[in-house]
Amino acid sequence: MQDLNTVMFQSTEAFKKYRKFSGKQKATFLRAIAEEIEALGMDLIHTTMQETNLPEGRLIGERGRTIFQLNMFANLLEEGSWVEARIDLANLNRQPIPKVDLRKMLVPIGTVAVFGASNFPFAYSTAGGDTASALASGCPVVVKGHPAHARTSAMVAEAILKAAERTGMPKGVFAHLDGGEGFEVGKALVMHPDVKAVGFTGSFGGGKALYDMANQRPQPIPVFSEMGSVNPVILMPEKMKKDAGNIAMSYASSITLGVGQFCTNPGLIFGIENEDLEKFMDILSNEIEKIAPAIMLNEGIFKNYEDKKTIALSQEGVNTESVSKIEKTAQTQGTSTIASVSADVFLKNPKLHQEVFGPYSLVVKCKDEVQLLEVLNHLEGQLTATLMATESELIANEEIVDTLRNLSGRLNFNNVPTGVEVCFAMQHGGPFPACTDARFTSVGPDAIKRWVRPASYQSFPDSLLPDELKHNNPLNIWRMVDNEFVK
Amino acid sequence: MQDLNTVMFQSTEAFKKYRKFSGKQKATFLRAIAEEIEALGMDLIHTTMQETNLPEGRLIGERGRTIFQLNMFANLLEEGSWVEARIDLANLNRQPIPKVDLRKMLVPIGTVAVFGASNFPFAYSTAGGDTASALASGCPVVVKGHPAHARTSAMVAEAILKAAERTGMPKGVFAHLDGGEGFEVGKALVMHPDVKAVGFTGSFGGGKALYDMANQRPQPIPVFSEMGSVNPVILMPEKMKKDAGNIAMSYASSITLGVGQFCTNPGLIFGIENEDLEKFMDILSNEIEKIAPAIMLNEGIFKNYEDKKTIALSQEGVNTESVSKIEKTAQTQGTSTIASVSADVFLKNPKLHQEVFGPYSLVVKCKDEVQLLEVLNHLEGQLTATLMATESELIANEEIVDTLRNLSGRLNFNNVPTGVEVCFAMQHGGPFPACTDARFTSVGPDAIKRWVRPASYQSFPDSLLPDELKHNNPLNIWRMVDNEFVK
């Protein structure tokens, strides 16, 4: 491994140049990264298949998403309005004192340390959303390669370095640390004084540990850790009366999609105890029993799934409702499992509120809407919350809707939470413990805001201002001038 | 004092209602607060004069600023576009999977604890920028009254409660804790699980302590502490050749304005050693000697000024250049003082980089532009940095300009840093230690962003969406629809 101080010195030197690069220049770099990743072809896909046990189709899709994200940030830079330019013109005649000319825009904060996710070896790892958004913002990036897909990470890192070189980016704009399994390299990185922000996607344990570590720094830095979520789903009775069967079918798919290894996997399902819920359970169980066990990302994740599931299923009052009836053909295959519990028991046992990462869901049976609301009031922060309801149920249960709104980043209606659209209106992030700062998203163009700060220029000569703030708006971007949005 | 748990319970209950209030409703509340503060008339001014030793004219001006800020946030709410609505329309024909309808806007995060500043008993205290921005966002506020102006704080709190009652705000939307001098009440407030964010303005010691305390919480929360800053001023030689005399005159005023008790007070002045700098020193010294000592905010601040100044002046290589020649007429009057030091000594002694809160400035004499740049590279984060330069000097010294840009929130040209305009383009906040999170400002409409988080609605029925996100845009606000800004 390279010496961390050398890496950070080069990164900091690179920042001095890179932060002054235009949006168009940075866009060229991002597009080149996308091209270089594509150029790795099936070699990359096959390597990642070996390392992650993810199927080819899924990985080809995820590579597409990664390339889409890089190009999306390139588009954002080329359009240019993302810098939130604000201009307040001088007014020399203002009483009692003249008003000065003030202009503000977003500028990058410095080197971002990125810790990728095991479950998205492309889209939320080495060249994933955190790296793409940080490079787009004008920040250099240092990636700590994920030990669960180390070769994939190294290949993608090479592609990024190649893109940096051929588009004339400063040496050090991107660096890749291969730190192996231990925490030492990651810890040294987070504690390094020249690291100015951290992006992490992964487990609650890992994300919180990183956050706490960073808080020991003499200089505080922003740490955006996207961590666990159980993504509660609420089954309202009128909707269930109409549609329990279809809902059960779609949730059987959502719970087991990608062997349940998505951060938006629906881990808790809340219903009102009645015959429609019984019907839902029967159909869901029937489907779950037919789903073949599939290999999980790695042994650690498989073991974690087994351990967490065993703990959950062994709690008093928890019934195992269904388990896949298809036999395992490999040791680290995850077996889809559904359990149920009464709301009374759920309320008393915090262990049941925790994420079981894998193809597992716990159905919580409430006596009525009053108890349902009580249970929801005891939930922690979530990436998503989903309401399966009729429109009249939404109207009649404003408090339930509002409670879910307040605890989640994304409120979903008559849909499954899995499937995270990459677009401006996506919020991927939510109140703690879903992430460490709910004021930001890790998905979509707004993910760039994690790595930037507003900077004002007072009474600066027009010709020396950044183009974004020049009087005649040479970039033709949207700006707020004297409180009005104009272009 | 009221029981903190009761206060927090009421605040949390209030949040359930208040977060659903429309922008127009919240604006009515803010405008009513402004009216109630105005209605306190000269009683308030006289009370504050007694508590803070600030002169009547200054306090009348600051009350005006406070009222302006409340009305500014009311305007922001009435206009409505601040919620950053983003809409991505559904596309059922998209391949390979249909695109869902997603809509996002900013929503409040919950109760904000506010710790006001001693040096702005109105504008950055009980009904100041933090409170106004938090109430505007839809968050309830709990203020820890500042012990240095406890009666002022109580009077303003009464005005806010009166405004809340007459505009039909939920009980608990605002609370005021009179905690006296100790840290117990403040600590209990910051550690309370129902506090969801903290706003602080004050010293580095206080702000960092609060930040560290909050990091001990099981649930992390955003803490925005605006702390110290020495606000470096760079005197470039060509500009000095033309204008050393006028610059000295304007800095004599800026350094001593309000007995130097502003967070943007210019505490460090960097120049190139030559006859123009000597001329500057002579005129500055001459002016400083004529400035009458004036009573500082309170004994603690006076004592702190004396202690910090004594430490600075006693450092090896520091010369006291000038001290006011007018005799003190009261014990806690602060005496204006200018010192100087060579850049060589400054570089070696970190004690000289620290803020001396009061009418004090240290002039650092550099051999040349190379040493100037070296010194600037050793400075910590700042609220402001100021360049006194000709335009050709700006062009010729890009690295100096860029270094100042990178370490400060506001970069100021041929002006004094004191005087903080309240407008969209103002950035008041900067890299640590100027504040704990440079990604936000405490002054201007954007200060609201500290207390909000993006929240998405997926596939929600139009009629049940917040007005900000409804298809026909009933509030007529600026929104981003399918990547385009439209109204």
Image (tube, coloured by chain):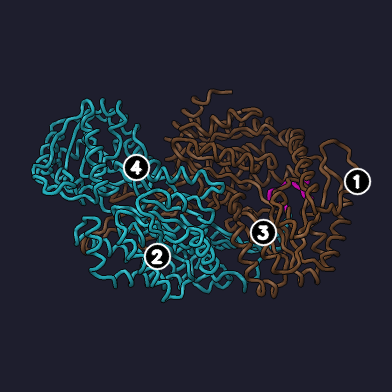
Chain colours: A cyan, B brown
Asked whether residue B264 is drawn in magenta, I would say yes
Tell me: residue A247, above or below residue B155. below
Q: Residue B449, image x and y in percent?
A: 50, 49
Mark 4 is surrounded, within 10 Å at the Cα level, by few (under 14), some (14 to 19) or many (20 or more) other residues, namely: many
Mark 2 is surrounded, within 10 Å at the Cα level, by few (under 14), some (14 to 19) or many (20 or more) other residues, namely: many
Tell me if I can see residue B92 in this picture: yes
Magenta residues, as a range?
B256-265
Report, in whole angstroms, how far the alpha carbon at label 2 lies from the one at label 3. Answer: 31 Å
Q: Residue B318, image x and y in percent?
A: 80, 53
Report, in whole angstroms, how far the alpha carbon at label 4 lies from the one at label 3. Answer: 41 Å
Label 2 is placed on what type of residue?
A: Phe
Q: Is residue A458 left or right of residue A265?
A: right
Residue at numbered disc 2: A73
Tell if the residue under mark 1 belongs to the same chain as the one under mark 3.
yes
Instruction: Residue B63: name its quadrant.
Output: top right
Residue at numbered disc 3: B385
Q: Is residue B50 left or right of residue A132?
A: right
Tell if the residue under mark 2 belongs to the same chain as the one under mark 1.
no
Q: Which mark is residue B326?
A: 1
Do the CB atoms of the residues marked 2 and 4 lie less than 8 Å apart?
A: no
Q: For the point 56% across and 67% down, which residue is it?
A: A469
Q: Earlier in the sequence, mark 1 or mark 3?
A: 1
Q: Residue A41, image x and y in percent?
A: 25, 70
Count of residue discs: 4
Tell me: residue B318, above or below residue B271. above
Say which element carries label 3: strand
Report, in whole angstroms, how far the alpha carbon at label 2 lies from the one at label 1. Answer: 61 Å
Residue at numbered disc 4: A382
Tell if the residue under mark 2 belongs to the same chain as the one under mark 4.
yes
Tell if the residue under mark 4 belongs to the same chain as the one under mark 3.
no
